Image (spheres, rainbow, N blue to C red):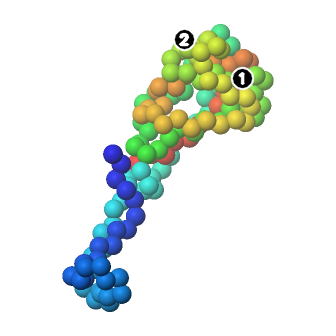
Amino acid sequence: MPIPTGTVTVVDSGIPNNSQTMVPDAAIEKTEIVDESQLNHRTFVAQRTLVPTITAAVQLAKGVKIPKGCYLLLKALSGNGGMIYIARNKALAENTKNSFYLDANETVKLRIRTVDEVWIGADSANDGVNWIVEQD
């Protein structure tokens, strides 16, 4: 279960059912609860990945982890001549019926653990995507 975000104020005046009671500042306890997924990250990785031939899907990248609370943002290049096919493995990315597709300039966010989990195929040689992910 995720931890709630925000400030919690606990007031105990000692007088039940009395909403008009003035409470001294010393009786108010403030607790800050921080959800790590809301913190800013120090840097990011951004890259362009192209599919050199229409018959062979390519892995987006290797060794790029996605921190908890972040997502991978993919955007199909504006000059693409056809669809980009996105899937979790090479075979699915090469099968246009079993993959998610993007037309030129369309985007998708993926909440996954690593960029390694994404493969792309294309209708036209040298079509591709730009992608970005925040890093700790």
What is the number of the mark on residue 83?
A: 1
Q: Mark 2 — residue?
A: 91
On the question of residue 64 being in view, the answer is no
Is 45 left or right of 79, judged from the image as shown?
left
Residue 117 is tagged as: none
Q: Quadrant of residue 132?
A: top right
Q: Residue at x 43, y 45 (%)?
A: 69
Q: Amino acid at mark 2?
A: Ala
Give the structural element (helix, strand or loop) at label 2.
Answer: helix
SS for dot 1: loop
> How dense is the environment of label 2, judged by Cα within 10 Å: few (below 14), some, or many (20 and up)?
some
Q: Is residue 48 above or below residue 121?
A: below
Dot placed on the residue nearer the N-terminal end, 2 or 1: 1
Q: Residues within 10 Å of mark 1 (few under 14, many from 20)?
A: many
Q: Position of residue 134 (x, y in %)?
A: 49, 46
Q: Residue at x 42, y 34 (%)?
A: 113
Q: Where is residue 107? Give x, y as percent.
A: 65, 37
| Residues marked 2 and 1 touching at CB (< 8 Å) | no
Q: Is residue 99 above or below residue 18?
A: above
Expressed as whole percent of the image width and height from the top left, the position of residue 125 reads 72, 18
Q: Amino acid at mark 1?
A: Met
The answer to which quarter of the image holds residue 5 is: bottom left
**Residue in the image at 34% along x and 53% along y:** 3
Pinpoint residue 57: horizontal percent, then vertical percent.
59, 16
Real-space CA distance between mark 2 and mark 1, rounded to the nearest whole angstrom: 16 Å
Q: Is there any visible trace of residue 17 in the rendered image?
A: yes
